[in-house]
Image (tube, rainbow, N blue to C red):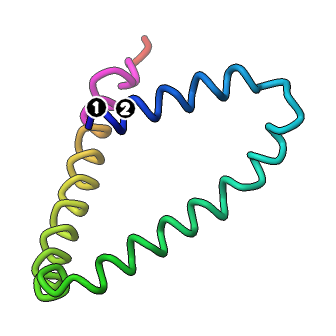
Amino acid sequence: MFTVITIMIAGILAGLALKRHPVSGFIQNLVSPAIWLLLFLLGLSVGSDPSIMDNLLPLGRYSLFLATAGVIGSALAALAIWRLFFKKVPRK
């Protein structure tokens, strides 16, 4: 984990140093294809791992449950905050 954070901080510092350099435009054009490649490689890794593929359906159900619970919880919290802070006060 230390390596990942160090590389990320080094990238941020390099980005700050090269902000006005002409190479920054070239780098920005490479970001999307690099992310697509990383996503493809991640999918390749997941697809070739039998333990992940065997547990994909239960993991998917659990993920769907967590996502649904998160959305419902957020909606209920937003409703409570709306009623608490933005309730109309009757005027006389």
Looking at numbered disc 1 in the image, what kind of residue is underneath it? Phe
In the structure shown, which secondary structural element does the residue marked by tag 1 occupy?
helix
Looking at numbered disc 2 in the image, what kind of residue is underneath it? Ile
Image quadrant for the C terminus? top left
**Which residues make up the magenta segment?**
80-89
Which residue, as the protein is rendered here, is positioned at the far front? 3
Q: Quadrant of residue 47?
A: bottom left
Q: Is residue 45 left or right of residue 70?
A: right
Q: Quadrant of residue 80?
A: top left
**CB contact under 8 Å: marks 1 and 2:** yes
Q: Is residue 53 left or right of residue 42?
A: left
What residue is disc 2 on?
5
Q: Residue 11's spot in the image, x, y percent?
A: 56, 32
Camera-side residue of 57 and 9: 9
Q: Residue 41's spot in the image, x, y percent?
A: 44, 73
Circle 2 packing at 10 Å, graded few (<14), some (14-19), many (20+), is few
Circle 1 packing at 10 Å, graded few (<14), some (14-19), many (20+), is few
Camera-side residue of 79 and 17: 17
Which residue, as the protein is rendered here, is positioned at the far top? 92
In the structure shown, which secondary structural element does the residue marked by tag 2 occupy?
helix
In the rendering, which numbered label is found on residue 66?
A: none
Up/down of 40 relative to 12, above or below? below
In whole angstroms, how far apart are the C-alphas of marks 1 and 2? 5 Å
Q: Residue at x 82, y 47 (%)?
A: 26
Q: Residue at x 66, y 64 (%)?
A: 33
Q: Residue at x 20, y 67 (%)?
A: 63
Q: Residue 57's spot in the image, x, y percent?
A: 16, 85
What residue is disc 1 on?
2
Image quadrant for the N terminus? top left
Q: Residue 74's spot in the image, x, y percent?
A: 27, 45
